[in-house]
Amino acid sequence: MYHVRSKDRTVPKMKSKGAVKKRFRMTKSGKLKCSRPKRGHQHAPKDAKHKRNKRKAIIVTGTWAYLLKRMMGGG
């Protein structure tokens, strides 16, 4: 019979995803924030209300928040 060392029976660590860490940030209370899409260019045809609303951050909640936190390296 083979002898198995205890070191070999550990669960491998999850690697954090750099793309997620780049696009989302964690608030002090543990929520996830990200910026709104379509803010890059071609702002001339958009009205002021549309551009103003794009400045507000998105707070990610629910299942997506749980998955993204795990991808960022948090438990």
Image (cartoon, grey):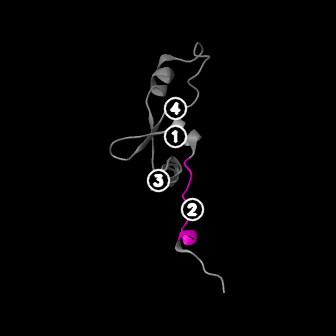
Q: Earlier in the sequence, mark 4 or mark 2?
A: 2
Amino acid carrying label 3: it is Gly
User: How many residues crowd around disc 4 within 10 Å: few (fewer than 14), some, or many (20 or more)?
Assistant: few
The CA distance from mark 1 to mark 4 is 16 Å
User: How many residues crowd around disc 1 within 10 Å: few (fewer than 14), some, or many (20 or more)?
Assistant: some
Which residue range is magenta in the image?
Answer: 7-16
The CA distance from mark 1 to mark 3 is 18 Å
Please state which of residues 10 and 64 is positioned toward the viewer in this rendering. 10
Q: Which residue matches tag 3?
A: 62
Count numbered badges in the picture. Answer: 4
Q: Which residue matches tag 2?
A: 12
Q: Residue furthest bottom?
A: 1
Q: Which residue matches tag 4?
A: 36
Quadrant holding the N terminus: bottom right
Task: Please provide percent x and percent y for residue 9.
Answer: 56, 72
Q: Earlier in the sequence, mark 2 or mark 1?
A: 2
Q: Which residue matches tag 1?
A: 21
Please say if the residues under marks 4 and 3 sit with CB atoms less than 8 Å apart.
Answer: no
Mark 2 vs mark 3, foreground winner is 2
Q: Earlier in the sequence, mark 4 or mark 3?
A: 4
Mark 2 vs mark 1, foreground winner is 2
Badge 1 element: helix
Amino acid carrying label 1: it is Lys
